[in-house]
Image (cartoon, helix red, strand yellow):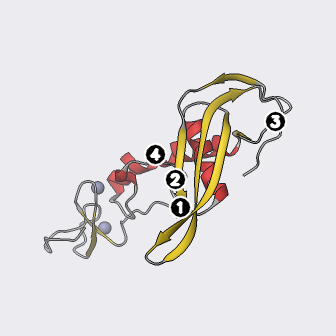
Amino acid sequence: MTLRDSDKSCVSCRSSKVSHSCPLCEEAICSKCVMRPPQGAFVYQVNCESDLKHPAYCQGCFAERVEPALEQYEETLAKARDVFVFFVTQRKEIPLIRKSKELLMVQEQEDRDVTILKLAFMGAERGFNAIIQCDVVSTKVRNEGYQRSVWNGKAYPAEVDADKLNRYGF
Ligand SMILES: [Zn+2]
Ligand SMILES: [Zn+2]
């Protein structure tokens, strides 16, 4: 977003040296008052709202919109790291309590573990402690003349009896 109005002053400190425009409220912000989400914020959250994907905000919008979402994200990410992952190749019996019918899908990822963690995050978001029938495969895609591998993954959220199970360990 660009600053169309050069007479604007910073919404927080009234400095005339504005450097940004808040993507949410469109108020001008100076470089001292600009608020930036930490590096990697929301990366494991598939379908993260577009409002949360901007690099910089005014203090008001950051406090009101971004901070609570970041807290929620960190909480869910911590749960996602504890989610039990059972692959399609799993032969041992899973101590299943309940299973969701919703197929989770993550596509075109650079990395296998990131693909799995994103699936686990989706499971944790839905209140489950496991993902089952997890299937993660790499495929080659052509991108402007060169080939690269991407990872696609799917799984079902499930609740399992957590006692005596080994965690995948992210
Ligand atoms: Zn300022
Ligand atoms: Zn704002």
In the image, residue 85 lies at what x, y percent? 71, 41
- For the residues labelled 3 and 1, the Cα–Cα distance comes to 35 Å
Q: Secondary structure at mark 2?
A: strand
Question: At x 64% / y 43%, what residue is drawn?
Answer: 80
Residue bearing mark 1: 40
Q: Amino acid at mark 1?
A: Gly
- Circle 4 residues within 10 Å: few <14, some 14–19, many ≥20: some
In the image, residue 8 lies at what x, y percent? 16, 69
Question: In the rendered structure, are the residues bearing label 2 and label 1 in contact, judged by CB atoms less than 8 Å apart?
Answer: no
The numbered dot on residue 91 is 3
Relative placement, left or right, of 77 versus 14 is right
- Circle 2 residues within 10 Å: few <14, some 14–19, many ≥20: some
Judge depth for marks 1 and 4 and give the one in front: 1
* Quarter occupied by residue 91: top right
Question: In the rendered structure, are the residues bearing label 3 and label 2 in contact, judged by CB atoms less than 8 Å apart?
Answer: no
Residue bearing mark 4: 69
Judge depth for marks 2 and 1 and give the one in front: 2
- For the residues labelled 3 and 4, the Cα–Cα distance comes to 38 Å
Residue bearing mark 2: 107
20 and 32: which one is in front?
20
